[in-house]
Image (tube, grey):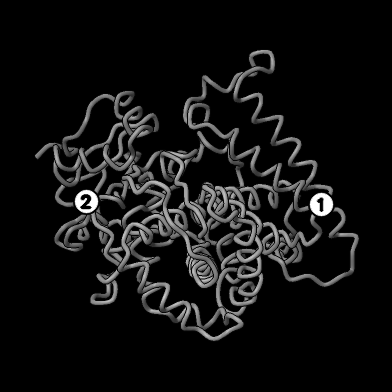
Amino acid sequence: MSRLPSGPSNALFTTVRYLRDPFGSLLGAARKYGDPFTWPTFLGKMVVTGDPSGIKTLLSADPDIYEALGADLLAPVLGENNLILLSGERHRGMRKLQNPQFHGERLHAYGRLITSIADEHAGRWPLGQAFSIQKTMQAISLDVILQAVLGLGEPAARAAFRDAVLSIVAALKPSFMFIRALRRPMLGLSAWARFQRLRATSAALFEKELAARRASAEPREDILSLMLASRKEDGSAFGDEELLEQMISLIGAGHETTASALTWALYHVHRDPSVKARLVEEVRGLAAPLDPQAVTRLPYLDAVCSEALRLNPVAPIVGRTLRRGLTLQGYDLPPEISVGIGIVNLHRRADLYPEPEHFRPERFLSREYGPFEYLPFGGGSRRCLGAAFAVYEMKLVLATVLRSHSLRLIRDVPVRAALRNTTVGPASTIEMARD
């Protein structure tokens, strides 16, 4: 047996295809080369598996044998203190500090906020006129994060941060993220130079907000204020740059991914009249005013969210780099090789999900899937910190919208997935109308 499994050989061709069709490229590689397969990238070779047994091997291993994928390459772009790029004790320490803010009572405290924001945005939809559902979902998700994470209640401050966040997200390009040679100013005209200017503007805005928080004695319970008052394990406070990098990660990634998941859910629900009728009946059966905790207990709504995340995961693959050797499905992998979990490959397995290409929420009512069979937010020690928050927001937004509004798709046509910055969303605009 060869040292590495077979796979495509050309990193440029593979990367270009992934950028254009992330799901198709990963599923096609598995069909052609089997599981696992070796995936050539600009970060080096990655051995990818979508098999539950292989995933169990990766997620059950000592987390200290891994380091964050591409940390050295991405740190100048995303920040050296960004949680997704940390490894070892620093990663565990940062997660320990942030984790309580996204679970339990802290999570439930955001329920009324989420439903009121969703209701406000949905109320602006014009009757009988087409609108982009993804733009609305992005606006809702961003407002939720700006108010829940940053605690920005004042509309003018929220608008300023909203513009700053959206400009950074739009300026973040996979090209300079993964190719160092493209990080050149070119007389201030390059995409890299534009990104740096926008980041500096956002940093100045953020530092002004931090100064105001520190000068105020008003008690606050938003995530930024709680982190501002927190202390690291050595007793020191977070610096402005550390807080900025964490907030950029939470805001930039959180609003885009949740908005895509909500868009896919509404798209699939409105393509199947039986699914829509069952879901609408369930959410409209709740008493008014809407109780967020009652929403979270709705079984069919939970199944709809789970199926949307299965069929269209926002991260089709997650990877890590080996610090030490590891045996994976008969292959002895050396240090410095990366390993990846093909989430879309796992979620499209016909032995786990019969008719895997079809939207079937009922599958989650008749079966409970294990942690190595369903992982839309990754798994193990690097599972998405905001997973519970994202699902909570999905349920509340869907329930709020479908209780009060009757929607229809303008065009009931297949929509493929495409890379949007670093995550995956609909490749084309999904238009809906309110009747």
Please identify, in this view, whether the residue under mark 2 or under mark 1 is nearer the observer.
Answer: 1
Number of labelled discs?
Answer: 2
List the single residue furthest toward the left.
1
Relative image position of residue 368 (x, y in whole percent):
27, 75
Q: Label 2: state its secondary structure.
A: strand
Residue 407 disc label = none
Inter-mark Cα distance, 2 to 1: 55 Å
Which residue was labeled with disc 1?
Answer: 156
Q: Residue at x 23, y 43 (%)?
A: 27
Relative image position of residue 333 (x, y in whole percent):
24, 43
Label 1: how many Cα within 10 Å (few below 14, some 14–19, many 20+): few
Residue 327 disc label = 2
Q: Is residue 67 above or below residue 359?
A: above
Q: Label 1: state its secondary structure.
A: helix
**Looking at the picture, which amino acid does disc 2 mark?**
Thr
Q: Residue at x 23, y 77 (%)?
A: 366
Q: Residue at x 46, y 54 (%)?
A: 263
| Left or right: 66, with 250 as reference point | left
| Left or right: 82, with 399 as reference point | right
Q: Is residue 197 above or below residue 434?
A: above
| Left or right: 120, with 430 as reference point | right
**Looking at the picture, which amino acid does disc 1 mark?**
Ala
**Quadrant holding the N terminus:** top left
Q: Residue at x 51, y 24 (%)?
A: 180
Quadrant of the image occupied by residue 378: bottom left
Relative image position of residue 80 (x, y in whole percent):
60, 43
Relative image position of residue 376 (x, y in whole percent):
37, 59
